[in-house]
């Protein structure tokens, strides 16, 4: 887990001592703070407050925008910034402290916490690694096959692990690196042998898998919650699964091949990878008791999620039952739970932002924003507006270092705008929710594992962005044709 | 913090591997689980459910009692037990998962979290140690003086640090041990030199300081919250301070002297302790920048708490502002916050229990319990009932390993009973809230630091309990005379 720990959303700029007063870090902090204050003041004094929004609601907007700005500029760790925003919202933003802290008791946040616990168990027991090796042993005879195998692994794990930092960065990435090294492909001249292709191909794959499941990424349940709050549209695990599986599999089939053409590896046949996987599996021996238990719990949780329409067990309750089972069977200790720094980090910033976003909506700000953006489109048909809005929304991700920040800032106003224009709610919700995920493929900082993949140094900045842009066109083409058609077919719109 | 970590409420039975099937640990677990199930079934099928309580409310009672039982028997760590109770309450206890998780967004719980952060800073910067050494340098010329000095340190820290595990176990206890070793007093024959007296004397002192402040112990805000919820009686930090200071100082003056008579140390003059403290202070040099900042924030938070009647800033908001200031000034890093395992441990069990207790009250169970206990007292005057109830309540602590568990299980029904009997609410609330704290002095497991003090091995089990019992009589005598009179004087009743 050293991997994960060193790259969680907020620990990357952490240091145990205060930086020297003149260090670049201090300068960056002070400059960022000034930008954030300017942002707040600009909203308060330059942007006209609509009559329907109370002054406190407008101050809340300023606090929220400054918090999102802080997540992008990172003068302090994200969690600390959000916590401060929560405190300020309770003093100036018209919320009581009870309301401001409400997100920390929200089932959506606890779903993510429970899923973190389960993923913790999959990684700790070695089950996640076993799954990856099984895929490679099966289809790993070519470098393209290895890329498919690792994307498939990530897809399986995404059905229950919403931390792509843990899943893609913690489980899949180390295997990418191992396979590359197996062929003597290291950062530098030998990167072209196979490492460069594998890193970019698998990275693009993990951005697709994030879009495929309710649990594909931490902010997907957030989108579902916003859909429920704003439009009373219930997005379940099963519905997201149904919606994501067809366009997702299409993308997963096409994208590695596209990357293979854009960045062809010198080594194309990789029988050693399959042998390596077979040998590693042999070395691991038969699955240990703890792996079997973790696997059984993993499958049970997924099964209960898929069948929730029948037994009506809340999705969070199911996940928490899975965590409890892991604790009771001793697969995880209590110490594993309370010392999971990445989980507590996400808990604080996620719970805080969730509540701030919700309160902003309650204060009527989101509605007003959508109304004013809507004015720009005149009387255009919703199809035109949807197309334009989706493209703006998608490429706005160049400005975000987190899918959650992107989703939280832009999903509610854009979705509200489109639904007010009579676009079908299901189509709007799923397109905006899914597109924010694979938009992370554009850059080397778009979501938690992005810097982890990029930092291995196999791929230049220019190549990373060029491939990201081409793949974005492919993904947009697939999801807006195959995806929209499939969603029509299954009755989402 | 190794100290604290090894003795938090739940990590003490933690192990990273599953115990062997036949180990005493497994047997204990299975036996405990059977007891808890029996407890649940007994409540469901042997105890008649009052007509005013719904079946789901009665099942909630069973879950709650089993959870308290689990905190006492410890088949699994306390946090895990409470989390499972929360999940079960949402399935069987008539709560939605939103309601069951509500405690995690409660300001009371976040007050404790914020205070943990502040205490973390006091310990990390060495400020807490400096305060202790200053006290010893001043009044440490005799062994009785050292005992007073360390109790006074704990009292100062208790004004803002509700974790007595961190405060008494993490700061004060290591100094107790250092002073004892200074005189060659080790566990065993040399314990009688001075170590035995210091350990018991200071231990009894820290049980008194826990009763003196709103923040003296994690469950004190809980008692205040229950008082507000049940009787609309507002208990502020300032009011608790006013109520606790007089009887608390009396107890702190008398108790060390009583222990000194019961367990007289061989060494009575300890000039070396004062010299030791002076030397250590010299070695520490002038206060570092981080110590000054932490001290300034500590004092500011206390000042804001005391003056909250004027500015109406919520107590939790004040504490969170203090935490934010520590993060912004770099005294604490974000990593310090997310890796504070003891804080997250307390967060889970405390937030869960808080909500379960509240829900039980909402379900009408507490009221019914008080009504039936009240029946046993016939038509006796409230004075008689208060005296009897306080004694039962106090000595019931022999059965509790946690002040929180004690408070949560017994405060609401007893307080409700007395108030229904027309006893003055203020008197009832403060007596039951305070008495649960110094009741921890009875045993070697009554609150988190108890096993930490006891485990040093300076004092035999028999002596520990004997002194605990005598001191309990002294404390009861002081608080029910001086305390009650003082509370009358300041208008609490």
Image (tube, coloured by chain):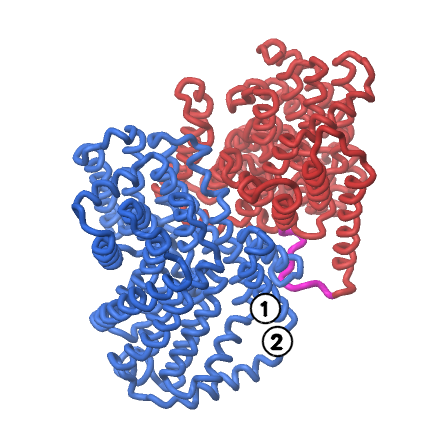
Chain colours: A red, B blue
Q: Main secondary structure of the magenta part?
A: loop
Host chain of mark 2: B
Q: In terms of secondary structure, where does tag 1 sit?
A: helix
Q: Is residue A126 above or below residue A221?
A: below
Mark 1 closeness class: few <14, some 14–19, many ≥20 residues within 10 Å: some
The quadrant where residue A86 appears: top right
User: Label 1: chain?
Assistant: B
Where, quadrant-wise, is the C terminus of chain A in this rendering? Answer: top right
Q: Which mark is residue B287?
A: 2
Q: Does A449 appear above or below B465?
A: above
Residue B192 in sight from this viewpoint = yes
Compared to residue A388, the image places residue A50 above or below, namely below
| Proximity of marks 1 and 2: CB atoms separated by less than 8 Å | yes
Residue B295 tag number: 1
**Which residue does the image show at 64% across and 21% down from the upper left?**
A429
Query: What mark, if any, has residue B437 been given in the picture?
Result: none
Please give left or right for residue A363 compared with residue B100 in the image. Answer: right
Q: What span is colored magenta in the figure?
A: A10-20
Regarding residue A281, the answer to whether it shows in the image is: no
State left or right for residue A187 relative to residue B344: right
**Residue A185 percent location from the top left of the image:** 68, 44
Q: Position of residue A67 (x, y in %)?
A: 69, 43
Q: Is residue B101 magenta?
A: no
């Amino acid at each position: 887990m050293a991997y994960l720990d060193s790259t969680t959303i907020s620990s990357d700029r952490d240091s145990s001592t205060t930086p020297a007063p003149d260090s670049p870090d201090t300068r960056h902090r002070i400059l960022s703070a000034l930008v954030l204050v300017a942002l707040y003041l600009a909203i308060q004094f330059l942007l006209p407050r609509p009559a329907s929004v109370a002054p406190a609601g407008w101050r809340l907007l300023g606090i929220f925008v400054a918090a999102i700005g802080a997540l992008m500029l990172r003068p302090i760790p994200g969690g600390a910034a959000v916590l401060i925003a929560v405190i300020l919202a309770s003093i100036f933003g018209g919320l009581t402290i009870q309301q401001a802290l409400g997100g920390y008791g929200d089932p959506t946040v606890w779903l993510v916490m429970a899923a973190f616990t389960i993923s913790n168990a999959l990684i700790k027991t070695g089950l996640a690694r076993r799954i990856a090796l099984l895929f490679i042993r099966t289809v790993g005879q070519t470098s393209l096959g290895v890329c498919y195998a690792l994307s498939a692994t990530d897809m399986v794990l995404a059905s229950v692990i919403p931390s792509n930092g843990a899943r893609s960065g913690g489980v899949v990435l180390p295997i990418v690196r191992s396979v590359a090294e197996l062929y003597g492909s290291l950062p530098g001249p030998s990167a072209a042998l196979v490492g460069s292709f594998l890193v970019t191909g698998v990275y693009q794959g993990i951005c697709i898998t994030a879009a495929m499941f309710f649990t594909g990424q931490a902010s997907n349940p957030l989108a579902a919650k916003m859909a429920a709050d704003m439009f009373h549209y219930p997005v379940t695990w099963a519905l997201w699964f149904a919606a994501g599986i067809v366009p997702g599999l299409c993308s997963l089939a096409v994208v590695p091949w596209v990357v293979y053409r854009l960045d062809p590896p010198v080594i194309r046949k990789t029988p050693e990878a399959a042998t390596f996987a077979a040998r590693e599996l042999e070395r691991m021996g038969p699955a240990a008791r703890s792996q079997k238990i973790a696997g059984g719990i993993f499958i049970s949780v997924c099964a209960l999620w898929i069948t929730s329409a029948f037994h009506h067990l809340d999705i969070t309750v199911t996940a928490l039952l899975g965590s409890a089972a892991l604790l009771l069977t001793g697969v995880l200790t209590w110490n594993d739970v309370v010392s999971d720094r990445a989980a507590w980090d996400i808990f604080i910033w996620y719970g805080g932002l969730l509540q701030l976003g919700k309160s902003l909506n309650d204060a009527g700000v989101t509605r007003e924003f959508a109304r004013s953006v809507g004015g720009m489109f005149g009387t255009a048909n919703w199809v035109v507006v949807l197309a334009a809005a989706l493209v703006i929304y998608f490429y706005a991700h160049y400005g975000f270092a987190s899918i959650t920040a992107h989703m939280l800032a832009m999903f509610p106003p854009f979705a509200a705008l489109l639904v007010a224009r009579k676009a079908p709610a299901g189509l709007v919700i799923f397109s905006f929710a899914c597109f924010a995920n694979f938009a992370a493929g554009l850059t080397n900082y778009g979501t938690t594992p992005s810097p982890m993949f990029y930092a291995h140094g196999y791929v230049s900045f220019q190549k990373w962005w060029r491939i990201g842009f081409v793949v974005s066109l492919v993904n947009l083409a697939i999801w807006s044709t195959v995806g929209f058609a499939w969603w029509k077919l299954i009755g989402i719109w």
